[in-house]
Amino acid sequence: MENMEQDSQRLIEQALQLHATDIHLQPGRKRTRLFFRIHGRLRLMGSMSIRYAERLTAHYKFRAGMDIGEQRRPQNGSLSLKYTSTPVNLRFSTLPSFRRESLAVRLLPQHEYFQLSSLSYTSDVTSHFSSLLDRRNGMLILTGPTGSGKTTTLYAFLHELTGRGARIVSVEDPVEIQNESYIQTEVNEKAGLTYRELLKSSLRHDPDVLMIGEIRDEHTAAMAVRAALTGHLVLTTMHAGSAHGAVQRLLDFGCLPSDLRENLLCITSQELVPRYCPLCKRQPCSIYCTHYKHTSRTALFDILTAKELQQCLEGRSSSVTVSKHNQWVKGYSLGLFQPDSDKEQMYV
């Protein structure tokens, strides 16, 4: 068991050193393959025997408080490690596959905060976000696909607001990055702690800023709008194909256009794109590059401002497709962009 303890710790440490966001143990017919997701791409790191993979999976399940004897149903668990090179939260998920149990591990490094000023290379974006965070009430919604950096941007906003002395209460599912500077609550459906119940309690706790991990149903959307209407700054995320799509989702959730016109400050849609490494001469940067591996991707924002939101809600632009290229050229970008180049390259 001692060797398995060391091996499991070594695997996590290796993933942290390579800035991986996920670890996957994928069972095959003869061997189990090990994958790391690095900079958004799944990379094959090696393979191991089926017996060894089963022992490793059982070890992680035991430490995460999961049932090691249950392999026919999906399970979820979590574990915090404080004595690795970077303190990290681990979220485990098992899935019974055709052959054997598959394991996925999400790595959430703690105490890693982006400053608001470091989110962008252009002062326009930083100034725009900073002015929004000065508002006393309203809603700021971040959208984008899974893995697009919404959570990182959201925590950068919270870190900035903490420095401004705001009282912050967050409702998350789950808490991704722990921070003692504000109150963090976690959804627990089994215990009856839903988004709806926690948001009701949070509004009675005198927050200046309310962070909602995700708007996923009509009840959460209604509570978010209510919080903004009653004088709170609401920061949240939503899964939508575009910034305009987020407006449509809010309407589908039953939000009144009049309430949205009054409260929506900004909706952003972001995505992460790879940069060209000047040392590796390749895209993306080599996972073994010791210089630029931690910044091999940059985020680009498509920002729907207050004026455009008003037009969208009034129906004058419901059929208009916003060009991301044009939005970035206007300055709503996060990273370097060269619109005149035939081949768009982003250098570190």
Image (cartoon, helix red, strand yellow):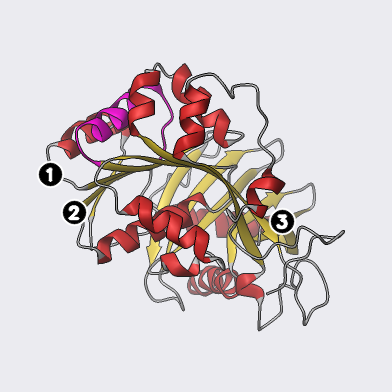
| Observer-nearest of 258 and 152 | 258
Residue 124 location (% of width, % of height) = 51, 60
Q: Local crowd at mark 2 within 10 Å, few (<14), some, or many (≥20)? A: some
**Image disc number at residue 330:** none
Mark 3 or 2 closer to N-term? 3
Circle 1 sits on which residue?
206
Residue 115 location (% of width, % of height) = 42, 68
In the image, what residue occupies the spot 65% across and 64% down? 297
Give the residue type that dot 1 points to.
Answer: Asp
**Image disc number at residue 167:** 2
User: In which quarter of the view is residue 283 placed?
Assistant: bottom right
Q: Relative to 337, is 139 above or below?
A: above
| Observer-nearest of 123 and 255 | 123
Q: Main secondary structure of the magenta part?
A: helix
In the image, what residue occupies the spot 52% across and 36% down? 74
Mark 2 or 1 closer to N-term? 2
Apparent side of residue 178 relative to residue 115 in the rendered image (left or right): left
**Image disc number at residue 42:** 3
Q: Quadrant of the C terminus?
A: bottom right
Nearer to us: label 3 or label 2 = 2
| Observer-nearest of 333 and 143 | 333
Q: Can residue 255 be seen in this view?
A: no
- Residue lying furthest right in this view? 342
Q: Are marks 2 and 1 in contact (CB under 8 Å)?
A: yes
Task: Please state the extent of the stretch shown in magenta in the rendering.
Answer: 213-232
In the image, what residue occupies the spot 24% across and 30% down? 229
Magenta stretch: residue 223 in it?
Answer: yes
Q: Is residue 67 visible?
A: yes
In the image, what residue occupies the spot 46% across and 52% down? 151
